[in-house]
Amino acid sequence: MTIPDGYDVVTERITVGGLTVAVRHPRSAEDLIDEDEYARDERLPYWADVWPSGRVLAEWCAGQDLAGLRVVELGAGLALPSLVALRGGARVLATDWYPDALAFARANARDAGLGALDTLEVDWSAPPPALVARGPFDLVMGADILYENRHPRQLAPLITGLAAPGGRVVITDPRRPAAGELIAEMTETGWRHTRVSMRFEGRPDERGSEIYRHTFVRRPA
Ligand SMILES: C[S@@+](CC[C@H](N)C(=O)[O-])C[C@H]1O[C@@H](n2cnc3c(N)ncnc32)[C@H](O)[C@@H]1O
């Protein structure tokens, strides 16, 4: 459970809900861009930063009673929300399509004294049977996972298949255009959607400081 070799690693101390985590991550996501990977499935190493939406989702987790809940994080990257949920007593599964992201997340969890973070390599376009087998989940969550046009049509059925009856879906998003399509697909297939606007207090990225927190619950039949 160590940091993978070959990275220029920096440590960022992030405090969320009273928990301070030394988040180790690669110094520069841009330096990790691999043209072969991109040619194969347009994969870009966005996992290597903690994004404003990830910090906002982690803050939200810190304010919830998640003890004993089954939680899955999609597109977790460095998985700060998962670490906070783990600290809160949830049974957490952090997922991403980059195995190295998950290795960093596990090492950061262990070094923060949170014990073993459960992880699974998952590509939304071909989710492994092991993911569904681990469900259903009381909380399906994700931060900044709607930044390409293909994401809503991959994620809507996946989320629906993973959420337990009575389960919740919480996605934080820096107002990316593709979010609208996910909301449309989910509401057409029986979900009720609410949105809360959150202010990110740290240094904003190109999307600014306003982050939306989307919550979906199933409409009663
Ligand atoms: C913008 S980053 C956000 C990372 C983290 N959630 C955060 O907020 O700090 C998007 C994440 O989604 C992951 N991702 C993108 N496409 C994916 C796919 N098809 N399957 C699984 N993960 C994917 C990326 O690897 C990356 O970790």
Image (cartoon, rainbow, N blue to C red):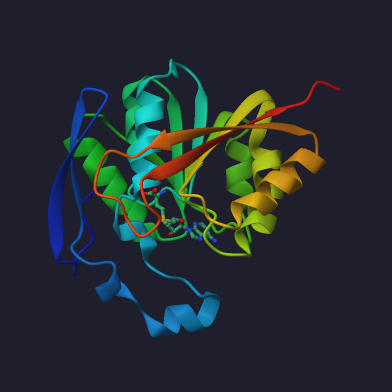
Q: Give left or right: position of 33 versus 150.
A: left
> Looking at the rendering, which quadrant does residue 152 occupy?
bottom right
Q: Is residue 112 left or right of residue 215?
A: left
Pick whichever, 193 or 209, lies toward us.
209
For the point 51% across and 52% down, the residue is 145
Is residue 141 in sight in this rendering?
no
Question: Which residue sits at x=23%, y=43%?
Answer: 108
Give how far across and how far down residue 196 sits, in percent: 52, 31
Of the 4 image quadrants, the one containing the C terminus is: top right
Q: Is residue 130 left or right of residue 46?
A: right
Depth check: give the residue in front, 214 or 151.
214
Against 37, residue 141 (above or below) is: above
Specify the farthest residue to the right.
221
User: For this view, does 198 lie left or right of residue 10?
Assistant: right
Q: Residue at x 15, y 60 (%)?
A: 9
What count of labels does the image hold?
0
Q: Is residue 160 visible?
A: yes
Q: In the figure, residue 216 lies in which quadrant?
A: top right
Residue 11's place in the image compared with 190, above or below, is below
* Image coords of residue 8 (percent x, y): 14, 66
Residue 154 pos. (x, y %):
66, 57
